[in-house]
Image (cartoon, grey):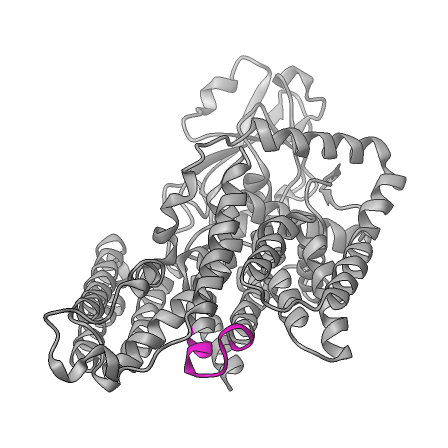
């Protein structure tokens, strides 16, 4: 039931946010590659339309391709189903990891709930990031390592292969290595033969695709491999301390996370505590599992910091032990509240968390209402609901975990309205909605060109493969579509032997505006009307 509860909670958190963040560059590449794969049937060499794209392994693309095979023109919700289901599995795996590391109890459910509702998980889980796939599958491999039985061994091999097929062997460095190192430091038993089977067979299975593309398109494979290696030390460089902002990405769980990292090792007995809470009357806790989790996290953070190339999403592997550690702190709080054994400092932290969660969730809902006045009547009740739920949590602090989860859901559903009702077109004639633009019959078969300034996002949202040309003189067709910035004017093309037959001003899912001009050469035959 705990696994199912964590899985369903993840679906409730992620599904409403599909339309909120807009299409990112990684997501656009995923969709274009999956669409091309479904059309041409080449599952082993991914393409961005006609361009070979080997920079990322194909497993996330394969899962999205299944959606295109079912429906050639799927909705954005359908396209996000694979990544949302995979992200929801993280909650299931964190429940099992907590059980194997810390023992059975209510805290294992907390681990699953925290893992899927941290801000980092939410952002990667609704933007089709390759990172979330690799982290989730490596978490599954760790669960299989800690469990027994042949079925779990096979599952571990498949999860290891899936992690390698999602983003290469990266998680061997950022998740498995710190986990094993922490296990050795704290003398935790490791099934070395089982580990060798999972890593050996999993990596072997996952490397088959890399071997295939190297033998099939060796020049492209070698070029991509060289570029990726160089990127580690030449692109997105940042300070060694870049990742110290990690508490922000815990979202609603930031204060419990910090309490787990620092507050848990404060002495719970204080001189000003009442005598009925004397230290000798409190049971002694085994803190070894928590110190192990802390060591696992710190080693993961250290290994990530040693790599010159840094991005926020690369932090995701470190949030797996953090979620489990945070769950232990939450369980400590709730148990202490029921037993009346928390110190005054811990009580202050609990109240600060509840007040902060209530005020932050209410403020976010009000901001959404102010930013999307069309949805005002829909969003305002959620702001009121946040105040009611938060107030109830302050009166009943022992229920702080379900209260925090409900506040997260209130914000998520308030944000859904803002995202799903965001305008997708500039209401200035002549124009049309982005979805309509992609399917206009009179644009079918026309080539798309751009002088500059387009990328995978624009190609995906326009639904066309665009060709970059240095000048209009390089275009041979008599009739074509030109992608341009919002500032472009139709008069710019006069005197160049071209006429503007149509002009579209469209807004992308991220709020940027672009223009598309349908251009005809002077003297060209009139197009047939559809």
Residue furthest front as drawn: 280
Q: Nearer the viewer, residue 310 or 201?
A: 201
In the image, residue 479 above or below residue 522: below
Q: Main secondary structure of the magenta part?
A: helix
Point 66% across, 49% down: residue: 167
- Relative placement, left or right, of 322 versus 253 is right
Point 56% across, 61% down: residue: 80
Point 62% across, 44% down: residue: 442
Residue 418 shows in the view? no
Point 47% across, 69% down: residue: 289
Residue furthest right as drawn: 215
Q: Position of residue 398 (x, y in %)?
A: 25, 81
Q: Position of residue 212 (x, y in %)?
A: 86, 46
- Relative placement, left or right, of 463 versus 418 is right
Q: Nearer the viewer, residue 124 or 171?
A: 171
Q: Quadrant of residue 217?
A: top right
Q: Position of residue 519 (x, y in %)?
A: 58, 28
Residue 257 shows in the view? yes
Highlighted magenta segment, given as a residue range: 99-110
Q: Position of residue 418 (x, y in %)?
A: 34, 59
- Relative placement, left or right, of 441 versus 62 is left
In the image, residue 476 above or below residue 376: above
């Amino acid at each position: 039931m705990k696994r199912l509860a964590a899985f369903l909670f993840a679906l409730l958190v992620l599904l409403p946010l599909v339309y909120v963040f807009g299409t990112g560059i990684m997501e656009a590449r995923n969709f274009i590659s999956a669409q091309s794969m479904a059309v041409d049937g080449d599952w082993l060499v991914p393409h961005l339309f006609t361009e070979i794209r080997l920079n990322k392994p194909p497993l996330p693309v394969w899962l999205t391709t299944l959606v295109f095979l079912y429906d050639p023109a799927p909705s954005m919700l359908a396209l996000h189903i694979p990544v949302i289901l995979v992200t929801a599995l993280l909650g299931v795996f964190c429940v099992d990891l907590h059980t194997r590391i810390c023992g059975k109890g209510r805290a294992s459910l907390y681990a699953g709930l925290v893992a899927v509702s941290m801000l980092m998980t939410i952002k990667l889980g609704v933007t089709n990031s390759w990172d979330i796939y690799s982290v989730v599958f490596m978490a599954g491999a760790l669960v299989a390592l800690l469990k027994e039985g042949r079925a779990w061994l096979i599952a571990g091999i498949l999860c290891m292969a899936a992690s390698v097929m999602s983003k290469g062997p990266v998680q061997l460095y950022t998740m498995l290595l710190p986990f094993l190192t922490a296990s050795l430091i704290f003398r935790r038993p490791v099934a070395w033969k089982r580990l060798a089977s999972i890593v050996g067979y999993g990596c072997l299975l996952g490397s088959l695709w890399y071997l295939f593309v190297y033998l099939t398109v060796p020049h492209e494979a070698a070029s991509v491999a060289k570029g990726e290696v160089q990127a580690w030390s030449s692109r997105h460089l940042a300070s060694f301390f870049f990742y110290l902002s990690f508490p922000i990405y815990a979202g609603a769980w930031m204060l419990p996370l910090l309490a787990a990292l620092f507050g848990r090792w404060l002495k719970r007995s204080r001189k000003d505590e009442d005598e009925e809470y004397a230290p000798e009357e409190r049971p002694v806790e085994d803190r070894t599992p928590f110190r192990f989790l802390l060591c696992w996290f710190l080693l993961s953070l250290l290994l990530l910091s040693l790599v010159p190339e840094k991005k926020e999403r690369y932090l995701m592997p470190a949030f797996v032990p953090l979620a489990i550690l945070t769950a232990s702190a939450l369980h400590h709080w709730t148990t202490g509240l029921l037993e009346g054994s928390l110190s005054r400092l811990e009580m202050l932290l609990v109240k600060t968390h509840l007040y902060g969660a209530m005020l932050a969730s209410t403020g976010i809902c009000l901001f959404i209402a102010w930013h999307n006045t069309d949805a005002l009547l829909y969003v305002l009740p959620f702001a009121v609901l946040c105040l009611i739920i938060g107030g109830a949590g302050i009166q009943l602090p022992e229920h702080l975990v379900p209260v925090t989860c409900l506040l997260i859901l209130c914000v998520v559903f308030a944000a859904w309205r803002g995202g799903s009702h965001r305008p997708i077109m500039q209401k200035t004639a002549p124009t049309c909605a982005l979805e309509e633009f992609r399917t206009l019959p009179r644009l079918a078969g026309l080539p798309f060109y751009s002088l500059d300034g387009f990328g995978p996002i624009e190609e995906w949202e326009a639904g066309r493969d665009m060709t970059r040309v240095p000048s209009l003189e390089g275009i041979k067709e008599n009739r074509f579509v030109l992608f341009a910035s919002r500032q472009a004017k139709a008069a710019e093309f006069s005197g160049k032997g071209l006429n503007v037959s149509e002009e579209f001003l469209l807004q992308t899912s991220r709020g940027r505006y672009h223009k598309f001009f349908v251009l005809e050469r002077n003297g060209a035959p009139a197009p047939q009307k559809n």
